[in-house]
């Protein structure tokens, strides 16, 4: 207990060359950082307790926080989780993609460390390299974001490497995430769709696809996605939100052409572009030594809900 993580050399391999090595490492119980359309994930065999323990150690992640299990097909998802008709409809419409569905877990399928004691599991089918990797591996991969617990999620291989080097053997470089914020987490209960975490799939898109309202939690409701602690996704700099100009010693992160901004999340006011840029721009301003990052107001529509959620967490009091 408490021993510092063993330092080991961390390689970065381009996705085109990494498949065999990634499969080999996963099969031997090692965690591997992998690209997804949302953020980079730190993946390990979701049925292997030792492999899962390595994820928690590498990230220094609290064990009460369950992991999302990633699947490559609906058949694999149904082997692990119990799908009601509405959850199945959502999966068929939006997978592969930036959506996680919380469903009842089937017993003796995933290791308990993946579930943190819950009787439900968060399932997601990612796009691209990682979906192919799961298909090759043949079992679900648990993967939280590939960052030390509490830090900004990585949207590039370099960012994943910077956070976890010396703690994992391999980062697979699949280029920057096309969505840039983590998946939207939904749970269907008694025929109603509940939003557990806003993310890369907007509520508007979900509502228009299924013709049902998505219910948001009341502001003071108990935390239902156990990872949704208030302070999270934090840069080193202090944060001030809804800023219309930079005060002394502040660096301004703009949106839609904010005058005087050091960086602009989307000069044209495109919320998808802003989501893609959010974590890498915060990291860049942090690396440049900003003491306070002042962020321009971001509209709440579409992906603005996820962006504002992450900004509020980045700005929350730290512990
Ligand atoms: O886009 C994403 O979702 C990325 C990529 C790598 O897939 N993953 C990700 O994982 O963001 P992580 O561990 O950083 O966030 C997972 C969230 C946590 O807040 C966790 O508490 C919640 O999902 N979660 C997992 N299983 C759950 C369950 N059974 N019920 C409620 N929340 C759950
Ligand atoms: Mg995370």
Image (cartoon, rainbow, N blue to C red):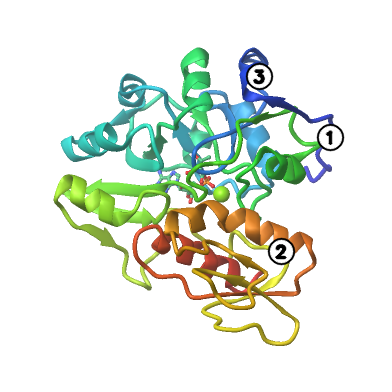
Disc 1 packing (10 Å; few <14; some 14–19; many ≥20)? few
- Image quadrant holding the N terminus, namely top right
Left or right of 189 in this view: 300: right
| Residue 299 picture location, percent across and down | 40, 70
179 versus 127 height, above or below: below
User: What residue is disc 3 on?
Assistant: 18
Res. 227 in view: no
Name which of mark 1 and mark 2 comes first in the sequence.
1
Name which of mark 3 and mark 1 comes first in the sequence.
1
**For residue 244, which quarter of the picture?**
bottom right
| Residue 177 picture location, percent across and down | 54, 41
**For residue 304, which quarter of the picture?**
bottom left
Res. 296 in view: yes
Q: Tag 3, which secondary structure?
A: helix
**For residue 41, which quarter of the picture?**
top right
User: What residue is disc 2 on?
Assistant: 285
Instruction: Quote the CA–CA distance across marks 3 and 1.
Output: 23 Å
Disc 2 packing (10 Å; few <14; some 14–19; many ≥20)? many
Name which of mark 3 and mark 2 comes first in the sequence.
3
User: What residue is disc 1 on?
Assistant: 6
Q: Is mark 3 within 8 Å of ligand 1?
A: no
Circles 3 and 2: CB atoms closer than 8 Å: no
| Residue 280 picture location, percent across and down | 64, 53
Q: Nearer the viewer, residue 154 or 278?
A: 278
- Image quadrant holding the C terminus, namely bottom right
Q: Residue at x 69, y 57 (%)?
A: 283
| Residue 203 picture location, percent across and down | 30, 55
Disc 3 packing (10 Å; few <14; some 14–19; many ≥20)? some
């Amino acid at each position: 207990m408490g021993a510092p993580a063993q330092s080991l050399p961390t390689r970065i391999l381009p996705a085109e060359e990494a498949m065999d090595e990634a499969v080999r490492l996963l099969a031997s119980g090692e965690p591997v950082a992998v690209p997804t359309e949302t953020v980079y994930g730190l993946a390990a065999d979701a049925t292997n307790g030792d492999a899962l323990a390595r994820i928690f150690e590498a990230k220094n992640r609290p064990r009460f926080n369950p992991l999302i299990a990633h699947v490559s097909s609906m058949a694999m998802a149904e082997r692990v989780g119990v799908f009601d008709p509405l959850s199945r409809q959502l999966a068929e419409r939006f997978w592969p993609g930036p959506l996680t569905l919380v469903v009842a877990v089937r017993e003796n399928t995933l290791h308990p460390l993946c579930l943190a004691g819950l009787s439900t599991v968060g399932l997601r089918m990612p796009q691209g390299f990682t979906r192919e990797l799961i298909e090759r591996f043949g079992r679900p991969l648990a993967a939280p974001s590939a960052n030390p617990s509490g830090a900004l999620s990585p949207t590039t291989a370099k960012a994943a490497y910077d956070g976890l080097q010396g703690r994992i053997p391999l980062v697979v470089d699949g280029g920057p995430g096309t969505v840039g914020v983590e998946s939207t987490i939904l749970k269907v209960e008694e025929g109603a769709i509940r939003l557990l975490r806003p993310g890369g799939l907007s509520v508007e898109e979900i509502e228009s696809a299924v013709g049902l309202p998505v219910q948001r939690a009341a502001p003071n409701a108990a935390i239902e996605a156990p990872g949704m602690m208030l302070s999270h996704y934090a840069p080193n700099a202090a944060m001030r939100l809804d800023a219309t100009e930079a005060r002394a010693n502040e660096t301004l992160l703009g949106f839609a052409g904010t005058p005087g901004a050091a960086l602009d999340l989307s000069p044209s006011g495109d919320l998808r572009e802003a989501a893609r840029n959010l974590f890498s721009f915060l990291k860049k301003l942090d690396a440049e030594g900003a003491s306070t990052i002042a962020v321009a107001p971001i509209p709440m529509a579409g992906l603005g809900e996820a962006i504002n959620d992450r900004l509020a967490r980045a700005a929350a009091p730290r512990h």
